[in-house]
Structures are given as C-alpha cells and as structure tokens.
Image (spheres, grey):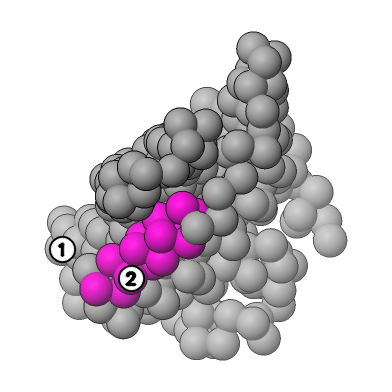
Amino acid sequence: MLVIIGYVVVLVAVFGGFAWQGGHLAALFQPKELFMIGGAALGAFFVGNNGKAVKATLKALPTVFHGSRYTRELYMELMALLFDVLSKVRKEGLMSIEGDIEAPHESPVFSKYPAVLADHHVVEFMTDYLRLMVSGNMDAFQIENLMDNEIETHHHEGSVPAHVIAKIGDGLPAFGIVAAVMGVVHTMESVGIPPSELGMLIAHALVGTFLGILLAYGFVGPLATVLEQKLEESSKMLQCVKVTLLASLNGYAPALAVEFGRKVLYSTERPSFAELEDHIKKAKSK
C-alpha cells in the first residue's frame, strides 16, 4: 500500500509541478520513448540474469505491494511455539518431539500456530535443527556454525531480486539518454521543417531523458530498497529461532531460551517480557 501511495506522490509532485508552472502535460505523453526505454530495460533484464534470477525476481515483485507480515503478533506466535516445543523436550525428552518435527503440519504442537506454519522457510529451519538436536551427535558450536552458514545462504539467495531490480534502475537513465539521442537524430534529419515543428521534436527527444531518470529514481530504484527490507525481516525470524535453540542447547530453561530469542528482535516488533509471558500462558490454555 505504501508503494502505491509513494507512486501517487511522485506523479502528483512531478507532473503537478510541471503543470503548475504552465507546462503542457500532453507534451510529456510519449509512448514511443517509453517503448524504447522499457523495451531496452526488459531486454537487458533477460540478458543479464540466468533463469533462476529471472524467476526469483518475477516472484518477488508482487510482494512489494503487500505490507510487512512480520508483525509483533507473528513473533509472539513463533516464540510461543518454541516455548511449547522446548517445554515438551524438557518434560518428556528429545525423542518426544520426533513425530512433531517429521510432520509439523500434522503435529498438535505446531498446528496451534498457523501463522508460523505458513512460513515454510522458518518451519524447515526450525525442524531441521531440532532434528540435529534429537540426533545428539553435534555440539552447540557446530550447530551454531551450520546455522550461520544457512542464514547467510538464505540472505544471499534472497538478495538476488533486490540486486536485479537495483541494476535495472541504474540502467534506466542511460536508456533514457539512448531514447533522447534517437529523438535528436530524428530531429537532425528533419531540419527542413518549420521551426515550430522542429521545437516540438526537440521537446519530444528531451522527454526520453526525463522519463529514464524519473522511472529510475521514482519507481524502480525504491523497489530494490523495499525488497532488501523484506529480506532483512525474513532473516530476523531465522535469527530468533537460532538464538532460542542455541540457548536451550546450552542448558537454559524454555522461558529463558525464549527470552534470548526475544532480545534479538527489532525494537519496533519486539514484545515486552510481560506481553510475551501473557501470550504464552494463553497459548498453553488452548
């Protein structure tokens, strides 16, 4: 929603300001210039990326129009789930959660938290390391190193769409210049026409540069920033799981282990100690 609002503000500010100073908006409507800039950018997108990057970018683009789903409520669900799992381990032993981690969608523990179950990355990350804990063949340092490597891989993989969009944004001003140069070439080959028509051709050519810069910094470039922010939020979920499981592996009680996880959350979404405690109590009573 914020992306759409931002786009509207950009359009009103730029075109409204142009009209305010007496400009004619019709002169800025140049579909041929847009075709050249957009077509060149699209072609460069396919040339500069492999199939995996193209698919990842096309899949990620619709998400920029959705608000963040990483809310305080989701984090509290995640930590309540971790508390339930670790409490079961503490009471019944590690082997008691074997069925839960093998089929989390059928588990009575995991099924209490549908918002967390909807994120397959988090569920897979959690169950994989719980499975390693059940095996008992790895110490905390080995698991922490493996977790760090997996989070780094997840971050690198998730950064591909943002990097691709940023590169497209960087190239748009140059494609705008290409369109402008093509307009100038057309103007120079039409020097015999009346000055009024010649001036119109020059104006049309300059619109290409304007459109390239506007699309780059007002529309495409900001999308890369949004994708980077969404990636940081998704990585924070994994870090919360990592810190909580490691704390449990080092012998801390479930309540303290969850407190470790709470502390790594961003302050804007981090629940207070009392809020989390109250949420866990309500979840246990279900």
What residue sits 52% from the left and 26% below the top?
Answer: 267
Foreground residue among 183 and 160: 183
What residue sits 45% from the left and 74% below the top?
Answer: 124
Q: How would you classify the magenta stretch by its main secondary structure?
A: helix
Looking at the rendered structure, the kind of residue marked 1 is Gln
In the rendered view, does 137 fall on the left or right side of 36? left
Coordinates of residue 233 in the picture (x, y in percent): 47, 46
Report the mark closest to the observer, 2 or 1: 2
In the rendered view, does 264 fall on the left or right side of 146? right
Where are the magenta residues, as a range?
33-47
What residue sits 55% from the left and 49% below the top?
Answer: 30
Q: In the image, which disc is placed on residue 168?
A: none
Looking at the picture, does residue 65 appear above or below residue 25? below
In the rendered view, does 223 fall on the left or right side of 118? left
Q: Estimate how packed mark 1 is, as few (under 14), some (14 to 19) or many (20 or more) residues with alpha carbons within 10 Å.
A: few
Q: Is residue 68 magenta?
A: no
In what element is the residue under mark 1? helix
Quadrant showing the C terminus: bottom right
Q: Which residue is mark 2?
A: 43
Foreground residue among 183 and 247: 183
Q: Which residue is mark 1?
A: 142
In the rendered view, does 182 fall on the left or right side of 61? left
